[in-house]
Image (spheres, rainbow, N blue to C red):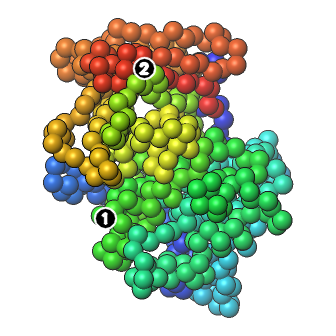
Amino acid sequence: MNGDPMSERYPVIYVRGFAGGQNAMDDAADDPFYGFNEGSTHVRVGAGGQPRFYQYEGPLLRLVKDQQYRIEVAGSQQNVLINADPGSLEPDSVWIYRFYDAAAGTFGVEPQSYDIGRAAKGLVDFIDLVRAKTRGAPPVYLVAHSMGGLICRTALQRELADPAEAVSKLCTIGTPHGGISPELGGPIGGWIMDRFGPLGSDIFAPRHMQEYMLPDGHDFARETDPKTGRWDPRRMVGTFPPSRILSIVGTNSRDYSVAAGLSSAVMGVQSDGLVAVRNAYVYGAARAYIHRSHSGRYGLVNSEETYQNLSRFLFGGLRVEVGLHGLELDRKDRIWQGEARLAIRGVPVLIHEQTADHYCPIDLNATEKGISGPMSPLPLLTIFLQPKNVRKCRYALDLKIISLKETGGILGFGDHLEQIADWQDTLIVDVEVNDNGAARSVTWEWNSTLVGRIAEQAELPNELDWAPGKSADGQWQLPVPIPLMGQAVLGRDARLQLGISLWA
């Protein structure tokens, strides 16, 4: 495509999540990078989910190594910013918003009480300072874990005068956009809210979120859920477009540490151990589902899966929205579900994994586009392509379609074969780039038609009909026909629709 996908390199500001009680806030303040420097050494692999060693360096080191970003410290990042001349700092820099320092009790002064609204106002000041001291006064990238995403949204929706100018993109990782709602109620559910709510059990309740996330006097009728009549905090308010947000959703409740056993039991299997899958995204935003827990040794923020999605979202040159079109499903007494897994050659993890095994299948019975249901949007998924330092990058999108018969609200298994899909295939796509990193050609084929191993396929036979300059608005809608075996299940006109647009 036209342009260099690496041309936009803006300052990255990290915003961490909730630390816990006073001791935890003190520990956070003791860390020079608030935990974003930490890596991991464990992955779940194999049929039995046995842990294996895999050394991931951590997100800050990877930004330095892969993207040549700078981390300015010199005793205090705040002092670096204050003492720098206006416009003197390079834009490819990483900054940590240290909002917990004032609440720490280790610096010999009385700690301040913690408040999300105050933290959001402080974030606005920090953004303004970073932009003022950076060459060209560029917008910033915000990257936030857990509650940090709510601080960012409060700043975008309530505090920033022109959020779309000040912030280029927002990536949230395991953020409870819809609040934290225990699967179990009673004393146990109350305990989990008290344990993880810095201002008490109401901190993640929608009625409390409304107080700190919405502007004063805001008429939130547009954001109310038509089914419940209540405000839905997953809907963005204001001028910042949801299309500039990536919500990374964790689906592994098993490995959440701290009070792991009790927490994951209370929150249920459809969660990362703390945040329910249905609450971990913003409507209209791109989503990446990864099988990681909220934190701990198998946590989201310090994982290869999250970094692969984050780096492509921030620095990728193309945005590809994949959808199933032309479906003719037999919906009479039948529930249809889909599964999607995305792999990239050379990357040792799946960067998107939305499956029934992880309690988050794609709901093909949903009718509304974009915000169709609690688990999945239509189109199926959004991919950001980052063909950096590789002349040809190969992607594999595995799709699986399953139907279950339902009569009177009860599932029937008389004609069911467990683990056998009605249709399953893998779309193999090669993206070839020019010397400057811009995409030149895209070829594809379904794995069911290839002979031999995928790794041995040097060339794919089908080329997408696109070229630089062919689209006046920089957007392409390109169909990929479903194989005949898939058409027998999904309909004669079934196809994958690739909506491709320039992203950087």
Q: Percent x, y for residue 183?
A: 40, 69
- Is residue 208 positioned above or below 96 on the image? below
Residue placed under numbered mark 1 in the picture:
255
421 horizontally vs 260: left or right: left
229 horizontally vs 88: left or right: left
Q: Number of labelled discs?
A: 2
Image point 50% across, 47% down: which residue? 373
Q: Percent x, y for residue 482?
A: 36, 18
Image point 37% across, 15% down: which residue? 492
Residue 347 seen in the figure: no
Q: Secondary structure at mark 1?
A: loop
What is the C-alpha distance between the residues marked 2 and 1? 37 Å
Judge depth for marks 2 and 1 and give the one in front.
2
Which image quadrant is residue 15 in?
Answer: bottom right
Residue placed under numbered mark 2 in the picture:
495
- Is residue 485 positioned above or below 15 on the image? above
Q: Secondary structure at mark 2?
A: strand
